[in-house]
Image (cartoon, rainbow, N blue to C red):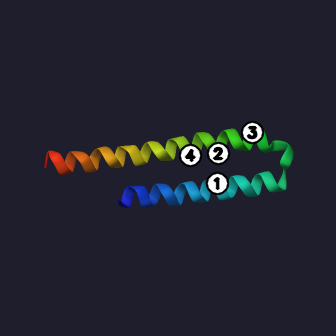
Amino acid sequence: MIGTFGVGLGIGVLVNGAVQGIARNPDASDSIQINMILGIAFAEAVAIYSLVVALLILFVG
């Protein structure tokens, strides 16, 4: 659960920065949005690793 809390917090901070960047420079919204989606995907990968570790501890340990 700690891993998913960190991921949720990180995604919130990432999207907040992207929205502020798009608000300041709407012409760069395509580039900002692509980088935001890529960052969210990497953060979600950490959540999946956290889930795998939790399942390993639950069923193997």
Q: Quadrant of residue 4?
A: bottom left
User: 10 Å neighbourhood of mark 1: few (<14), some, or many (≥20)?
Assistant: some
Q: Amino acid at mark 3?
A: Ser
Per the image, label 3 sits on a secondary structure element best described as helix
* Residue shown at 20% from the left, 50% from the top: 57
Residue 12, position as x, y percentages in the image: 58, 58
Q: Is residue 45 left or right of residue 59?
A: right
Residue at mark 2: 36
Q: Marks 1 and 2: CB-CB under 8 Å? A: yes
Q: Residue at x 14, y 45 (%)?
A: 60
Mark 4 sits on what residue? 40
Relative horizontal placement of residue 52, taking residue 30 as reference (left or right): left
- Name the image quarter holding residue 19: bottom right
Asked if the residues shown at circle 2 and circle 4 are in contact, with their CB atoms under 8 angstroms apart, the answer is yes
Note whether 33 is above or below 10 in the view shown: above
Q: Which residue is mark 3?
A: 31
Look at mark 1 in the image and give the residue it sits on.
15
Give, as a three-letter code, the residue at label 2. Answer: Met
Tell me whether circle 4 and circle 1 mark residues in contact (CB < 8 Å). Answer: yes
- Type of the residue with mark 1: Val
Kindly identify the residue that appears in the image at 50 percent across and 47 percent down. Answer: 43
Q: Helix, strand, or loop for circle 2?
A: helix
Q: Where is residue 52? Give x, y as percent.
A: 30, 44
